[in-house]
């Protein structure tokens, strides 16, 4: 008997009670192929054969045309979107950064390098990471599944992890990473003739912080110039929101007239405002000024187009002076669009102090909030509060992720930088 091949398609349709249309909720197909005489015989013909075509009813629907089940590629952003984020570096630096990231077998969706090893800062005798006095190269890797990533990476680079974390496994590492602010760092790692430090987080955690400023630990780092090595459309989109949010927050804390340097220093200082390392001998207290003085062109490339796109802000491209509209309605528009965490903290402050009661007319409420003379101080205080807890936790997590030996070496380097900043601050 010839082999029988047939395809059966079933459709389950549910009739909507609110309209006459029917909605298909599930369809599937099965295919059976027989290749031997032992196959089941075909079903017998109907006892009442008829040439009349079957009527198409709800119980006997017409078959749907075959559709492809191939996955469509993820949507891509226009090539020009977020081009302000692509900051140039020297060819030798770019090649080195890309070569280092390429060494990792574990899949990385988004990667960037930051800090004095990538963009020049004041306070360093040498900015060449290959020199003895040169800075360490800092990276952040955003991955899809942290435990899977650490499992692969731990197998490839066991020396990057302390012995006890290798014994406890990648599951332990990913659980520690999940603790706020959601980053695991491997530090003082020799690679390609330089010393690097790389932090691992998930794409979900990164994008959430960029949008909402949950901790400002990652979003704050990305307020400053970074070099993107591996790009991701979702991260690029949320990073553009993060940069715009930084501008809005800065405008609400600045006067009517100010300079671009004041804007850059205000934005760069957000992530340091409540950082416990700035109070302890663990960070250069002049770091914000060191960053902005040498990286002003990169800051302008990053922010200028976004600033002039906001209503009520005037910043000619040839000028370093900026002017903003201080009308309550304009400032209220900035205030309402702050990241969720910061906006909620600001409104809760006013609610708890009974300084302003929420009006039935929301536009009136936001305008009254925006014209309050104490608003800049409230925003600065709430930003410091957001940063303080996660920065403290991450400092403690560093002891776990680096081990005692590396922690002592890393702390000694940080104390040296703090001492230099302390000495320069007193001169």
Image: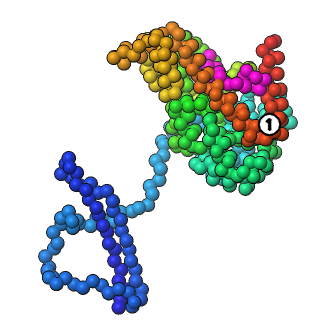
Q: Quadrant of residue 2?
A: bottom left
Residues drawn in magenta: 262-283
Q: Where residue 400 appears, x then y in whole percent?
A: 74, 40
The answer to whether 190 appears left or right of 307 in the picture is: right
Q: Residues within 10 Å of mark 1 (few under 14, many from 20)?
A: some
Q: Secondary structure at mark 1?
A: helix
Whether residue 381 is situated above or below residue 106 in the rendered picture: above
At 27% from the left edge and 83% from the top edge, which residue is drawn?
43
Please check the rendered image and state whether residue 281 is part of the magenta-colored stretch, yes or no: yes
In which quadrant of the rendered image does the N terminus lie? Answer: bottom left
What secondary structure predominates along the stretch shown in magenta? helix
| Spot occupied by residue 373 in the image (x, y as percentages of width and height) | 51, 8
- The residue that appears at 81% across and 26% down in the rendered structure is 415
Q: Which residue is mark 1?
A: 407
Residue 138 vs residue 211: left or right? right
Question: Where residue 387 sits: x, y (%)?
Answer: 62, 26
| Viewer-side residue, 217 vs 246 | 217
Asked whether 198 falls inside the magenta stretch, the response is: no
Residue at point 72%, 34% (across, down): 396
């Amino acid at each position: 008997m010839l082999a029988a091949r047939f395809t059966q398609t079933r459709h389950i349709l549910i009739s909507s009670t609110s309209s006459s249309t029917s909605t298909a909720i599930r369809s599937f197909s099965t295919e059976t192929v027989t290749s031997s005489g032992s196959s089941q015989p075909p079903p017998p013909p109907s006892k009442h054969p008829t040439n009349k075509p079957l009527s198409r009813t709800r119980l006997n629907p017409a078959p749907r045309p075959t559709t492809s089940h191939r996955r469509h590629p993820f949507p891509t952003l226009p090539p020009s979107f977020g081009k302000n984020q692509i900051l140039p570096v020297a060819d030798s630096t770019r090649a080195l950064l890309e070569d280092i990231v390429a060494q990792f077998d574990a899949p990385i969706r988004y990667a960037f390098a930051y800090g004095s090893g990538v963009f020049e800062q004041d306070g360093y005798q040498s900015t060449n990471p290959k020199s003895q006095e040169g800075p360490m190269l800092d990276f952040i890797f955003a991955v899809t599944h942290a435990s899977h990533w650490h499992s692969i990476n731990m197998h490839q680079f066991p020396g990057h992890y302390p012995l006890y974390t290798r014994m406890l496994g990648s599951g332990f590492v990913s659980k520690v990473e999940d603790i706020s602010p959601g980053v695991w760092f491997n530090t003082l790692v020799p690679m390609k003739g330089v010393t690097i430090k790389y932090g691992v987080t998930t794409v979900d955690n990164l994008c959430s912080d960029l949008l909402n400023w949950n901790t400002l630990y990652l979003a704050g780092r990305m307020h400053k110039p970074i070099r993107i090595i591996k790009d991701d459309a979702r991260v690029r989109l949320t990073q553009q929101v993060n940069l715009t949010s930084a501008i809005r927050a800065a405008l609400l804390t600045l006067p009517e007239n100010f300079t671009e340097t004041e804007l850059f220093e205000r934005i760069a200082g957000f992530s340091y405002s409540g950082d416990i390392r700035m109070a302890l001998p663990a960070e250069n207290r002049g770091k914000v000024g060191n960053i902005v003085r040498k990286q002003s062109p990169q800051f302008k490339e990053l922010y200028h187009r976004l600033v002039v796109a906001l209503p009520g802000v005037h910043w000619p491209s040839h000028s370093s002076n900026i002017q903003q509209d201080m009308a309550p309605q304009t400032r209220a528009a900035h205030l309402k669009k702050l990241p969720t965490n910061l906006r909620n903290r600001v409104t809760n402050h006013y609610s708890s102090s009974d300084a302003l009661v929420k009006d039935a007319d929301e536009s009136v409420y936001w305008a009254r909030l925006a014209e309050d003379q104490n608003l800049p101080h409230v925003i600065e205080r709430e930003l410091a509060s957001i940063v303080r807890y996660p920065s403290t936790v991450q400092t403690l997590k560093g002891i776990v992720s680096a081990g005692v030996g590396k922690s002592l070496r890393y702390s000694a380097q940080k104390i040296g930088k703090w001492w230099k900043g302390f000495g320069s601050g007193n001169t």
